[in-house]
Image: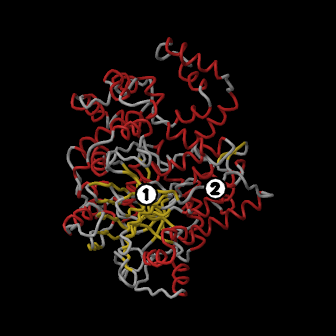
Amino acid sequence: MCGIAGIVGEGDGGRIDYDVLHRMCQTLVHRGPDDEGMFVKSGAALGMRRLKIIDLAGGRQPIFNEEQTIWVVFNGEIYNFRELRKELEDRGHRFRTHTDTEVIVHLYEDLGEDCVHKLRGMFAFALFDEGKRRLLLVRDRLGKKPLHYAFSRGQLFFASEIKAILAAAPELSTTNSQALLQYFYFGYVPDPLTAFSAIQKLPPGHLLKFEKGTVQVRKYWDLPAYGTCSPVSEEECLDQLEAKLTEAVRIRLIADVPLGALLSGGTDSSTIVALMARASSRPVKTFSIGFQQADFNEAHYARMVAEKFATDHHELILQPDVLDTVQNLSRRMEEPFGDSSMLPTYYVSCLARKHVTVVLSGDGGDEAFGGYERYRIHLADRSQFPIPRWTGSFYRNHVYPQLGYGTPGRNFAYSISLPWSERYIEAVSIVPAQRNFGLLSSELLNSFADDADPLNVFRKYLAEAPAGDPLSQVLYLDSKTYLPGDILTKVDRMSMLASLEARVPMLDHIFLEWVATLAPEWKMGKRGQKYILTKLAERLGVPHEALHRPKQGFALPLLHWMRHELKELVLCLLLEPRTLQRGYFNETGVRRLLNAFFEGQTDDYHEIWRLMMFELWQRNFCEQGIANDSTLHADCAADLPERVG
């Protein structure tokens, strides 16, 4: 696992300073605390920071081909690299290392940019072909690993994180208002935009080719048609699911360093731990956290699973300094990020890093098997409230505006008056809160044309979904937006801040392609959510109490904190003149939201958190400049009170 960065010019005459490349790499120390590698030649500079996982002694990057005309820097893991290496050696290629990175160079020699189709794993890499003066940037199919780029002054900059690009080109720090509006709507900035106008994310499943001064981006992978396969029996479906997920777990156990698992005690992580325990000759190291507030302390479920599978379990019961953690993380998040579960993800990553370098997690199960409660709610809404289009339009345009705030049923009626797809898209955005409270300023909203509506990107994915049923359509939508933009961003950033590699078997692309083709009734329906995955967990012996409980994952008592520990910070941040003068918020609407929340009329803490994290990002990242993360690993590794058992 690494952080990568570099610069490539249009021609070979431009000089790139080693110091600039080194400065880029220094912003990525937390992603790779073990080593730094740089190579500068012919107007191209490739650098990396390395977290040693495979071939500890010989895997230093950049990696070259035999003639040293093709170089690569790589972030991630290729799980089928041993099979690929044998094929390449049989074709005459000679290897200098035992690392997975080297197979990319030789595959490129044989296949060019189509080499990506051979790779199974999580990855973001940059390959420079000196002979063709070509830079190739590639990001894995689901977006597990990040990759950003910017074209400026005749040079293409790239890096795992935005701050590395800004270290080389601080003039690219102009913020992108359209991206910030997307953040307010969704709590993250969907691909390909970033919070900075000149910098973009390479979308998952895409590659970029920079040659002769031209940037070309193309998609190389997508999910197959949904719902085309229906096994003849539940037993057959379970057998196939078990075999495919077992393989996805097995190939992710390859490492030359200690390895463990994040365990929340829910269906997804428990299933992964069960398969790891079956494949391992030694007890699996598992890690979980809980909170002193009883309503949010679900550590006993994780403990129950750990006892069942005889793991070496490490548990941390937290009464964290939330204020300090929020301030700390917002200095290092280069975009505003509104998912509060980043806090427990960070805490459990710090705990795990004290014992292992690699963990497996259960992320991706909800998007694959229909696990979110919103799927059930909105599919039920679709069938229970069929409303003629003209009736809904009349209510929204003429009745709703006349009803006072707080009128019983006002918002529910608005929701069900929408076409079903619009109802779902609104439900995963801040639009209902904006309609109720008017949180965003009219200046911000009026600065965009109709075609810049943030919801358009979601509408596009729903329209393009290779699916005929509503569940599959929203699963596809979330796999393109919420999964890479929120879930995988959270897992990557928080684990990497702890210098910990996180692997996600349920997002193995071969496994996920098979799951996508399953008929929707195997995922969710009258028999329950994540039906077939839950049946597999039962088959593997996961305790019934852990499987059949309200879903929380790594939950946290955020509502309690915001009314107590964080109340002063919330009020100070959101109502200060300094905040309001930025022009993003409508003061009247924000005051109404806060009053309703602190008086107990609403529990709209997610919206408050989203606004708060935006202002913290403005202050701690944008105004203070690029954070120096070189000491973060030491901070994270500080003693944490834990229970082992």
- What residue is shown at x 65% (from left), y 43% (from top)? 471
Q: Amino acid type of disc 2?
A: Pro
Q: Is residue 154 visible?
A: yes
In terms of secondary structure, where does tag 1 sit? strand
Q: Is residue 268 above or below residue 56?
A: above
- What residue is shown at x 39% (from left), y 42% (from top)? 338
Q: Is residue 62 above or below residue 29?
A: below
Q: Residue 216 shows which numbered tag? A: 1
Q: Which residue in the structure is indicated by mark 2?
A: 224
User: First in sequence: mark 2 or mark 1?
Assistant: 1
**Residue 216 location in percent, x, y?**
43, 57
In terms of secondary structure, where does tag 2 sit? loop
Query: Which quadrant would the N terminus be assigned to in this image?
Result: bottom left
Q: Is residue 430 above or below residue 495?
A: above
Q: Nearer the viewer, residue 163 or 644?
A: 163
- What residue is shown at x 25% (from left), y 62% (from top)? 24
Q: Is residue 98 above or below residue 641?
A: below
Q: Callout 2: few (<14), some (14-19), or many (20+) C-alpha neighbours within 10 Å?
A: some
Q: Callout 1: few (<14), some (14-19), or many (20+) C-alpha neighbours within 10 Å?
A: few
**CB within 8 Å, label 2 to label 1:** no
Q: Amino acid type of disc 1?
A: Gln
**Residue 373 location in percent, x, y?**
59, 41
**Residue 538 location in percent, x, y?**
67, 58
